[in-house]
Image: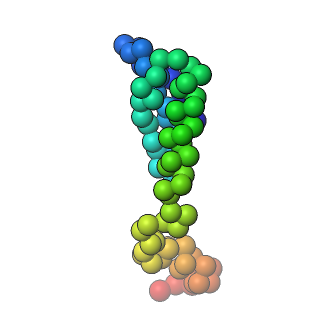
């Protein structure tokens, strides 16, 4: 998790990634200690609502090249 201030703002922001998805939000806080607490709560909230399984199944076409490289013997010609 990364906490930072934008140059033209007094507020702190948090930036983190959960299962490959990036989350970035304002903590609406100006104090560093309180910022850590708010950012931790935001992270926990995202983790609790995240499904451990991917929401979109992988298509067979995405695996085709790797499968064919495994299945077809070396030196085989069409």
Number of numbered tags placed on the structure image:
0
The residue drawn where x is 56% and y is 46% is 44
User: Which one is nearer the viewer's eye here, 74 or 44?
Assistant: 44
Is residue 18 at all visible to an observer of this figure? no
Outermost residue toward the left in this view: 8
Question: Residue at horizontal 57%, vertical 84%?
Answer: 72
| Residue 41 versus residue 14 in the image, above or below | below
Residue 70 seen anywhere in this rendered image of the structure: yes
The residue positioned 56% from the left and 19% from the top of the image is: 32
Q: Is residue 73 above or below residue 46?
A: below
> How is this picture coloured?
rainbow
Residue 18 place in picture, x, y as percent: 53, 49
In the image, taking residue 19 as reference, residue 59 lies left or right, namely: left
Tell me which residue sits at (48%, 56%) in the image.
Answer: 49
Q: Position of residue 48 (x, y in %)?
A: 53, 54
Q: In which quarter of the image is the N terminus?
A: top right
Query: Residue 21 at what x, y percent from top left?
Result: 47, 49
Vertical placement of residue 33 versus 74, above or below? above
Quadrant location of residue 3? Answer: top right
Q: Nearer the viewer, residue 16 or 29?
A: 29
Give 73 or 71, whichever is nearer the viewer.
Answer: 71
């Amino acid at each position: 998790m990364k906490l930072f201030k934008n140059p033209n703002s007094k507020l702190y922001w948090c930036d983190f990634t959960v299962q490959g998805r990036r989350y970035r939000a304002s903590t609406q806080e100006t104090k560093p200690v309180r910022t850590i607490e708010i950012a931790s709560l935001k992270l926990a909230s995202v983790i609790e609502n995240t499904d451990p399984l991917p929401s979109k199944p992988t298509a067979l076409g995405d695996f085709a090249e790797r499968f064919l490289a495994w299945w077809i013997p070396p030196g085989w010609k069409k």
